[in-house]
Amino acid sequence: MKLWGGRFREPLDPFIEEFHASLSFDKRLVLYDIIADQAHAKALAISGVISEELADKMVNALEEIKEEVKEGKRKVKGDEAEDVHTLVENWLTEKIGEEAGFLRAYRSRNEQISCDERLYLKEETSLIIQGLSSLQGMLLKLAERHKNWKIAGYTHLQRAQPLLLSHHLLAYFWMFQRDKERFLDTLKRIDISPEGAGAIAGGKLDPQVKANLLGFSRVFENSIDAVSDRDFILEFLSACAICSVHLSRLAEEVVLWSSEEFGFLSLSDAVSTGSSMMPHKKNPAPAEIIRAKTGRVIGSLISLLVILKGLPLSYNSDLQEDKPPLFDAVDTLKSSLKAMEKILQNACFNKEGLEKSLEDYLLALEIADYLLEKGVPFRKAHFIVGRILLYAREKSKKFNELTLEEFRLFSPLFEEDIYASLSFSSFLEKRNFPGGTGEEAVEKQLQKAKEVLSQYG
Ligand code: ARG
């Protein structure tokens, strides 16, 4: 049974019927649709459109349907109705008969679908935030476990300066923290009720009543905007895309770091795969898949941006196509967050491999700063250190293997104390400003991260 048809003489072409139907994907919203229907039945009774008894009958029957769906007794195949709204109403008609038709009073599917999506996203957003917290917890654990382990930091993928490994890991903690804040902020725009907007002009029921019944914090300001707005999904998908990009960058580091060339970490068998041809291979495939799935999530955001571009107000059937990319992004992001957590849980850092990256020349800046502190303009000091580096390379010596006489070939300002600057520990000690990579600074950062994690949960 359809929710329309009186003005049609011919049936819909069977192919077009299937082409246009959305139940195969919007069935995922079934529980939210039932909840919204229950609120509508109550709102109809509150404003005197239907009797309290009929509203109770509808609410109870819908409750039974909800339980049956939850328990798996009532299944949605996906082709038994045009969309999820029609399906739920058909089920209600099966339960209470023709009176179910009163549920359509003062109601349009245009407001209904936006309501279902908003209820769905309120829940999914908190699940994603939980997934992010869990991943952040894993990063914190790793940062704590490897306190004071040193590693080369890279810029341009070239060794740049010494760092603490925990500092590097915590960089991801803060990236995921920003993701979480973005999702929380998006939630403010998700949490607006479109109910009462009708098809476009606004219904005859007080929108505030349904917003209260459904637990929305706010009500739409304009009925036209309410039925055509998908900004809340765009924002949500943007947050998903940015978060996926963060996951992809971390995945890329896992791939690089687990290579023999880097040798910074090894992944346990639980998160590695093999090659059908090369018996020796152990591949970081799950991390590669996370990297690839980011493309899908970005694709979802782009799909919806393109769907919306050029749409006149207000509701257009194009909006029906917002759901496949939305659902795909939700599933993809949630599974990627979980996979990344498992990968990190199964990653074992290799102290020797990390220390190998700490080449002596990473301290070049320390020598330039030494000269700067003795009154040499930095540009000149930079040039001098460049020359010292060329000299040391020629002699196959490390900086701290050069004699004072050799240092003095380049500047008379060098004294015995230059050697105190030529260690990784002294480099780190000088970087204890807030947010720096010194041991004390990173300890404070760890404490702050723990606090932030416990605040946001
Ligand atoms: N199935 C539609 C969607 O997913 C909702 C129905 C919109 N109204 C209409 N007259 N077709 O957006």
Image (cartoon, helix red, strand yellow):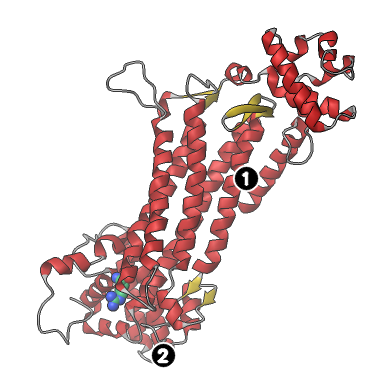
Q: Amino acid at mark 2?
A: Lys
Q: Amino acid at mark 1?
A: Trp
**Other-residue count near label 1 (Cα within 10 Å), few / some / many at <14 / 14–19 / ≥20:** some
Question: Secondary structure beneath disc 1?
Answer: helix
Q: Note whether residue 430 is visible.
A: no
Question: In the image, which disc is placed on residue 174?
Answer: 1
Please, is residue 338 above or below residue 3 in the view? above
- Name the residue located 83 percent from the left edge and 13 percent from the top edge: 409
Q: Position of residue 163 (x, y in %)?
A: 68, 29
Q: Position of residue 201 (x, y in %)?
A: 40, 87
Is 207 displayed left or right of 32 in the figure?
Answer: right
- Name the residue located 21 percent from the left edge and 75 percent from the top edge: 94
Provide the residue designation for mark 2.
Answer: 204
Q: Position of residue 74 (x, y in %)?
A: 25, 62
Please, is residue 130 above or below residue 195 in the view? above
Q: Note whether residue 426 is visible.
A: yes
Residue at the far left: name it: 10
Is 165 displayed left or right of 374 in the figure?
Answer: left
- Name the residue located 39 percent from the left edge and 31 percent from the top edge: 285
Image quarter where ligand 1 lies:
bottom left
**Foreground disc of the pair 1, 2:** 1
Q: Nearer the viewer, residue 362 or 439?
A: 362
Q: Quadrant of residue 426?
A: top right
**Other-residue count near label 2 (Cα within 10 Å), few / some / many at <14 / 14–19 / ≥20:** some
Question: In the image, which disc is placed on residue 286?
Answer: none
Question: Secondary structure beneath disc 2?
Answer: loop
Q: Position of residue 230 (x, y in %)?
A: 43, 68
